[in-house]
């Protein structure tokens, strides 16, 4: 499920410049953080996708939106409680989470984002077990990919040319997610910061879910 997408970066233009996804830079920044901070960033990226999975799941009662929600909440709770990690018995296995992927028989408009939600949760669980920064990068990439795909469909963009790709990158919904990720890294990178940042990251992710609030 791993993939890293790096759209063409726009020239810097001060405070008004457009954010872009840069996997290599993200890896560098995350590597410099503490393990719990990497988890906090990663779970915030999964959080923005939870409502997408719910929107996929609810119409035909497929998948398990409650399990997705409960798994993400367990990670947030562990972070808020100063626990170093979530014990694996409290979370489903990566293989169990993969069973929640949309099937062709249950495909709907939210299935692409549901796939990203499932993949990002798998990466989060793998991160908890390994502290491999690659998994944290993948959760962010999936959040970006989910809003990118949704925005492309909303604009009826299929085969993207350079101008279309540039316009898509600058779309408000894509920029909201990329700026949320950038702000999360700023908060976590504050030398004076502590785990009180967890609540701030959680609130920010819940305010700006991919596809809007339920």
Image (spheres, rainbow, N blue to C red):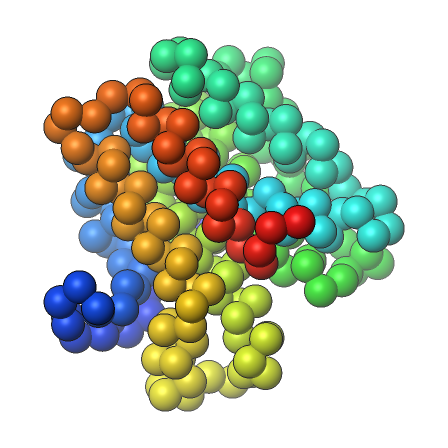
Q: Nearer the viewer, residue 170 or 128?
A: 170
Is 98 placed left or right of 144 in the picture?
A: right
Q: Nearer the viewer, residue 204 or 106?
A: 204
Look at 71% across and 51% down and name the residue there.
Answer: 55
> In the image, residue 62 lies at what x, y percent?
81, 45
Look at 69% across and 30% down and name the residue there.
Answer: 67
Does the rendering let one see residue 165?
yes
- Look at the picture and state if 15 lies above or below 72: below
> In the image, residue 131 lies at what x, y percent?
34, 28
> In the image, residue 73 lies at what x, y percent?
56, 26
Does the rendering let one see residue 115?
no
Residue 34 figure quarter = top left
Is 1 placed left or right of 180 in the picture?
A: right
> In the image, residue 141 lies at what x, y percent?
41, 53
Residue 121 figure quarter = top right
So how many labels did they put on this image? 0
Look at 37% across and 12% down and name the residue there.
Answer: 82
- Look at the picture and state if 178 lies above or below 69: below
Residue 189 figure quarter = top left
- Look at the picture and state if 59 lies above or below 204: below
Look at 42% across and 12% down and name the residue there.
Answer: 81
């Amino acid at each position: 499920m791993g993939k890293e997408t790096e759209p063409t970066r726009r020239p810097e233009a001060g405070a008004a410049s457009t954010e872009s996804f840069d996997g290599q830079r993200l890896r560098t920044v995350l590597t410099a953080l503490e393990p719990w901070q990497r988890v906090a960033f990663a779970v915030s990226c999964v959080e923005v996708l939870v409502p997408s999975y719910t929107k996929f799941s609810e119409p035909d009662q497929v998948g398990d939106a409650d399990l997705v929600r409960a798994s993400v909440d367990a990670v947030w709770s562990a972070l808020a409680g100063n626990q170093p990690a979530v014990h694996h018995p409290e979370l489903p296995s990566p293989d169990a989470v993969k069973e929640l992927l949309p099937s062709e028989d249950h495909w709907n408009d939210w299935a692409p984002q549901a796939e990203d939600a499932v993949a990002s949760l798998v990466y989060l669980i793998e991160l908890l077990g390994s502290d491999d920064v690659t998994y944290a990068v993948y959760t962010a990439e999936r959040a970006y990919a989910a809003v990118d795909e949704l925005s492309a469909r909303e604009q009826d963009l299929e085969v993207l040319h350079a101008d279309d790709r540039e316009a898509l990158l600058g779309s408000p919904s894509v920029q909201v997610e990329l700026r949320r990720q950038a702000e999360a890294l700023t908060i976590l990178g504050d030398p004076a910061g502590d785990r009180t940042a967890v609540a701030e990251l959680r609130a920010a992710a819940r305010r700006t879910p991919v596809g809007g609030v339920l």
